[in-house]
């Protein structure tokens, strides 16, 4: 048995290290470490409740809207108030813009450059992948990054700036959009759609979201000339549909709230049995047996986040969230599986939650959310309010959930006399990159790496990179 340490990873938000125990060239066990403690939850204690709207977004510079909205959801639960319909629409537009930008960055900046590595020099597609996707010099970045920047201009219209906007409230958004703003939104979305249909997909968005089977996806890969098709052909050659299987339990807390509910519903899907049910979100617990944390209550509403770097057996600053005692996977794959998208369900039936399924779900969401942003923009009523006024804040413990790009994000808060007594955060990467729990059950990424054939030099094995990056880690959120 040999032990290999892979990391620190580049092209990752935050600090990540993976330890692999390898026997006869096969990973027997993996341990995933978030090696930086940040302590944002302690910064919030004793402050006025509304300070969460200013401090929580600064946990992360790439998913700050998600952190804002989770804090707003907690405050809304404690008041409670009904958000202004326009406020929900504007919030969804801004949130979708951030999540699309995140998916786009992951595809072009974090994931695809690994196929330009010298390890693949003998593959027939390598020269084209190197010219298109190589870090820094690849031609794709010259198109994708300006398109991303243009999309994020929507944030300026709705929220004033990005990241770390202060525009999001329990009752909506603080800026009302005029007719000219709505026309500007439409123009920005038209430009972004043109980029997607020309470069990423080389096909209409409606044709992409209509894909419903693996066979249709294969035909699309062979017929379209876009970057997504290039990925699909590479994935077919490398058999990414067999790589990085997760624990089989997929969670979504519901995404993009509207007057009639979530655009993508909440649910818990067991891919092994096909069972889908309402997620028992009140059965979430945190295990610290292998975290650099002091012992605390398992219930996030009552727990603390206090570091203990001398804890025996610990190897990560991430806690281990569990749902009814089980490790669950979150993210775009979980959202679309729970929502019942036929292509995602077919991919899961064919191989489970794998590298291929995660990337397809994430890119599929780019097309789906762009169309949703167009719908929400058309539904705006400029003469109507954009924010409902605040109401008195109740004492007690409350929770708010949103779906960030990487998956389910929860904020738990306890208030007394308008002050924060407790604050606890479980981020998407905390779910996916959690360490083992007291029962020895590995986290989702740790399970996905087990059984991988890495050969004699596992530290340079590109497959490890593909599996880790398929979860799109954000370690600064993980360690709060």
Image: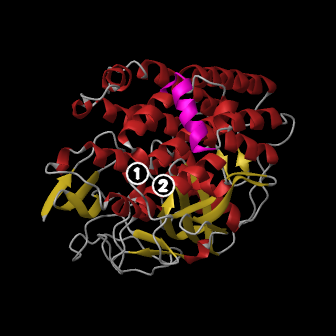
Look at mark 2 in the image and give the residue it sits on.
351
Query: What is the secondary structure assignment of the residue under circle 2?
Result: helix
Question: Can you tell which quarter of the image residue 398 is in?
Answer: bottom right
Instruction: Describe residue 8's horizontal placement relative to residue 85 as left or right.
Output: left
Instruction: Describe residue 278's horizontal placement relative to residue 144 as left or right.
Output: right
Look at mark 1 in the image and give the residue it sits on.
242
Query: Which residue is the extreme one toward the right?
Result: 383
Q: Position of residue 301 (x, y in %)?
A: 54, 75
Q: Residue at x 61, y 55 (%)?
A: 337
Q: Position of residue 214 (x, y in %)?
A: 57, 43
Say if 194 sits above or below 291 in the image: above
Which residue range is magenta in the image? 213-227
Q: Which mark is residue 337?
A: none
Query: What is the secondary structure assignment of the residue under circle 1?
Result: helix
Using the image as rendered, state which of residue 48 and residue 325 is in the foreground: 325
The C terminus appears in which quarter of the rendering? bottom left
Q: Are marks 2 and 1 in contact (CB under 8 Å)?
A: yes
Q: Position of residue 319 (x, y in %)?
A: 38, 68
């Amino acid at each position: 048995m040999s032990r290999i340490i892979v990391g620190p990873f580049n092209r990752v938000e935050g600090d990540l290290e993976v330890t692999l125990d390898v026997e006869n060239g096969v990973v027997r066990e993996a341990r995933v470490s978030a090696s930086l403690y940040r302590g944002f939850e302690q910064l919030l204690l004793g402050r006025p409740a509304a300070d969460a709207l200013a401090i929580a977004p600064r946990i992360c510079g790439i998913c700050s809207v998600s952190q804002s909205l989770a804090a707003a959801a907690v405050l809304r639960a404690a008041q409670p108030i009904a958000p202004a319909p326009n406020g929900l629409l504007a919030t969804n537009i801004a949130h979708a813009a951030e999540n699309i930008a995140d998916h786009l960055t992951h595809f072009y900046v974090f994931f695809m450059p690994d196929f330009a590595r010298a390890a693949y020099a003998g593959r027939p597609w390598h020269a084209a992948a190197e010219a298109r996707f190589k870090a820094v010099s690849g031609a794709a970045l010259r198109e994708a990054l300006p398109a991303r920047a243009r999309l994020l201009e929507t944030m300026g219209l709705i929220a004033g700036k990005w990241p770390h906007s202060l525009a999001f409230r329990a009752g909506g958004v603080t800026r009302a959009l005029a007719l000219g703003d709505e026309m500007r939104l439409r123009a920005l979305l038209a430009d972004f759609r043109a980029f997607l249909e020309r470069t990423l997909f080389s096909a209409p968005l409606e044709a992409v979201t209509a894909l419903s089977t693996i066979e249709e996806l294969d035909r699309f890969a062979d017929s379209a000339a876009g970057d997504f098709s290039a990925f699909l052909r590479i994935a077919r050659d490398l058999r990414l549909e067999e790589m990085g299987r997760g624990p089989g339990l997929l969670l979504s807390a519901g995404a993009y709230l509207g007057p009639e509910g979530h655009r993508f519903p909440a649910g818990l899907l067991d891919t092994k049995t096909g069972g889908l049910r309402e997620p028992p979100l009140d059965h979430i617990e945190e295990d610290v047996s292998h975290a650099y944390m002091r012992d605390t209550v398992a219930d996030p509403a009552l727990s603390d986040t206090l570091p203990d770097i001398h804890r025996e057996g610990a190897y990560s600053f991430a806690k281990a969230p569990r749902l009814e005692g089980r490790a669950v996977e979150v993210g775009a794959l979980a959202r679309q599986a729970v929502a019942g998208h036929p292509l995602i369900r077919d991919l899961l039936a064919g191989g489970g939650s794998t590298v291929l399924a995660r990337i397809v779900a994430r890119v599929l969401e780019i097309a789906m959310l762009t169309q949703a942003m167009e719908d929400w923009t058309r539904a705006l009523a400029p003469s109507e309010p954009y924010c409902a006024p605040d109401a008195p804040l109740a004492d007690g413990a409350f929770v708010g959930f949103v779906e960030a790009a990487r998956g389910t994000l929860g904020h738990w808060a306890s208030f007394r006399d308008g002050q924060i007594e407790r604050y606890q955060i479980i981020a998407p990467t905390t779910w996916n990159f959690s360490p083992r729990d007291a029962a020895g059950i590995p986290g989702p990424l740790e399970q996905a790496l087990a059984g991988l054939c890495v050969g004699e030099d596992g530290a340079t094995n590109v497959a490890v990179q593909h599996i880790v990056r398929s979860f799109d880690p954000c370690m600064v959120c993980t360690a709060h």
